Image (spheres, rainbow, N blue to C red):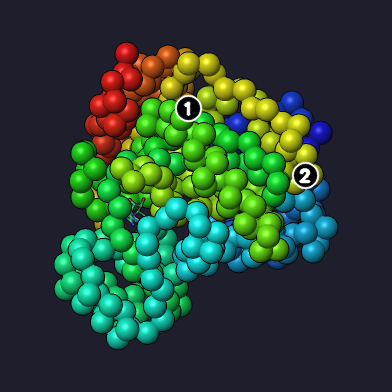
Amino acid sequence: MMKILVIGSGGREHSLVWKLAQSREVTKVYAALGNGGISETAECFNINPADFKALIDLVRRERIDLTVVGPELPLVEGIVDEFEKNGLRIFGPHREAAQLEGSKVFCKELLQKYKIPTADGEVFSDMEDAKNFLGKCKFPRVVKADGLAAGKGVMICKTEEEGCEAVEKIMGRKIFGEAGERIIIEEFLKGEEASFLIFTDGEEIVPLLSSQDHKAIYDGDKGPNTGGMGAYSPAPVVDAQVRERIMREIIHPVVRAMRKEGKRYCGVLYAGLMITEDGLKVLEFNVRFGDPETQAILPLLKTDLIIPLNACIDGKLGEVRLDWSEGASSVCVVLASQGYPGKYEKGKEISGLEKVSQDEGIYIFHAGTLKKDAAFTTNGGRVLGVTGVGNSIQKAIDNAYEAVRKIHFDGVYYRKDIGFRALDRGDGS
Ligand code: AMP
Ligand code: GLY
């Protein structure tokens, strides 16, 4: 019997809490910080995910058996190393392995060294060198800050002028601080993106279902990028053949490469891929579950989530097989506050949740919400993720939007076209 702590406060963490609470082995779930929805299932503590000491104190005091980390920042800052030093059990990669997400330069150099396909790119630590290089480039080009930048460190530049402006912002004005001491300038890739997540204990690999997220704020993937306006799973673009190639050309080589480098990777690894005419290319790795991909993937997972998590930590992943709802698809639509990803107001009352909470094939995951007495109010840019499951992408979409239309708060905004790429592929009936 286990007590579990989930670190984080978004929709991804709500879906992790929801799934872990169903485990027969789990007696109690805790969260730090949690949110309104999470507080219905887990006991929430107001501890910042960066405050390792306070988290360790909590785990000791409550005799928590396992900690699961949602966001990347604590992983990149070494929370796993710190917990293990204190003899505490935690799921996720060590600090050195988390560099795969924490440093785009580390990631690019590893991919180049081991000939794992990725966009051609050059690393710069001098602003003038970077600008001179841009003078010789074809456009569009992509400029990326090395370190963590809350999802804003990637700039797609259509002209040399835009490229120099991006370099100036990152290296001159240092808008991302130290994260911009080095940059990568890389070729712009055309194709369809997919998210491919796996569990690994450093050696064995167990893939999750494929997925695709929708980062842009407006329908048709237009407008500025957000933390993610929706996701669906599985992604039809990842057919059996593509999946086999992802495993052979990317996943196995990177897990092997990390081992060879003495940075054995244990945890969930998220590969952001571009499927181009020229083959598969890695866009990025994340060292954690995706948000909102996880809110689409987990409702399809039949296996108890605690099983792969424990097996990764114990180096026994070879014994694990994941079972998925056969033939089912899932779509998560994010409901956001008016103005997001720019300025928005908080504190709006949310209504209609009770109308959908019992609906079959509907799962509501809270992101930015607060619970006060029996009512929920908005407390962030992304407020809720509404996941619909069905026996086709079209049915999943219909289910999700039927539920979405019953939920309301002042200024509610959501995309109307989540899943459109899957439908365009003709997999919609
Ligand atoms: P990243 O954080 O590196 O995944 O970048 C965020 C987003 O920027 C990706 O999901 C892509 O949509 C886009 N992106 C990043 N690198 C490239 C590239 N080389 N070519 C085209 N789009 C890119
Ligand atoms: N869905 C993108 C991410 O989790 O980074």
Residue 362 percent coordinates (x, y): 44, 22
Query: Quarter of the image containing the N terminus?
Result: top right
Sequence order check: which comes first, mark 2 or mark 1? 1
Residue at point 48%, 16% (across, down)? 327
Is label 1 in a helix, a strand or a loop?
helix
393 vs 91: above or below: above
285 vs 370: above or below: below
Residue placed most toward the observer, 283 or 70: 283
Badge 1 crowding class, 10 Å Cα cut-off, few under 14, some 14 to 19, many 20 or more, is few
- What is the three-letter code of the residue carrying label 2? Gly
Residue at point 21%, 38% (across, down)? 219
**Separation of marks 2 and 1 at Cα, in angstroms:** 27 Å
Q: Which residue is mark 2?
A: 315
Residue placed most toward the observer, 141 or 219: 141
Residue at point 58%, 36% (across, down)? 207
In contact (CB < 8 Å): disc 2 and disc 1:
no
Q: Which residue is mark 1?
A: 240
- What is the three-letter code of the residue carrying label 1? Ala
Query: Quarter of the image containing the C terminus?
Result: top left
Tell me the quadrant of ligand 1: bottom left
Residue 361 percent coordinates (x, y): 46, 18
Image position of 120 (left or right of 106): left
Is label 2 in a helix, a strand or a loop?
loop
Residue placed most toward the observer, 176 or 31: 176
For the residues carrying marks 2 and 1, which lies nearer the camera in this image? Answer: 1
